[in-house]
């Protein structure tokens, strides 16, 4: 049962990171002074990090 709670917690972290990445993209789209390329890099890094956490939880 504890393993399932860890997996649910990691899904929560994953969704938080994805929403943070989307917020970064929307801020970059509104502000022309911030380069959008950096926001895309941050969004991809958030996705990669959260996917790594989920994979680690599933594999053990």
Image (cartoon, grey):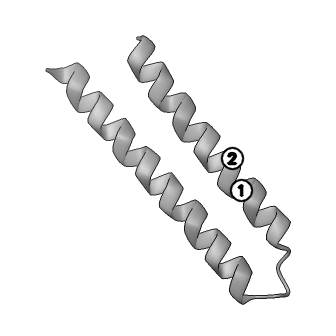
Across and down, in percent, residue 12 comes to 35, 47
Residue at the spot 54% in from the left edge and 34% down from the top edge: 51
Q: Which mark is residue 28?
A: none
Where's the N terminus, which quadrant?
A: top left
Q: Residue furthest left?
A: 1
Residue at the spot 29% in from the left edge and 29% down from the top edge: 6
Judge from the rendering whether residue 20 lies leftward or rightward of residue 8; answer left or right. Answer: right
Q: Which mark is residue 45?
A: 2
How many other residues sit within 10 Å of disc 1, few (<14), some (14-19) or many (≥20)?
A: some
Q: Which mark is residue 42?
A: 1
Is mark 1 in CB contact (under 8 Å) with mark 2?
A: yes
Judge from the rendering whether residue 6 lies leftward or rightward of residue 10; answer left or right. Answer: left
Where is 20 relative to 4, above or below? below
The Cα atoms of the two marked residues, 1 and 2, are separated by 5 Å
**Mark 2 secondary-structure assignment:** helix
Residue at the spot 86% in from the left edge and 74% down from the top edge: 35
């Amino acid at each position: 049962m504890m393993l399932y709670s860890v997996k649910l917690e990691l899904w929560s972290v994953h969704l938080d990171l994805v929403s943070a990445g989307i917020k970064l993209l929307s801020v970059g789209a509104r502000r022309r002074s911030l380069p959008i390329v950096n926001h895309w890099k941050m969004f991809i890094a958030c996705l990669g990090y959260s996917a790594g956490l989920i994979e680690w939880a599933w594999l053990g």
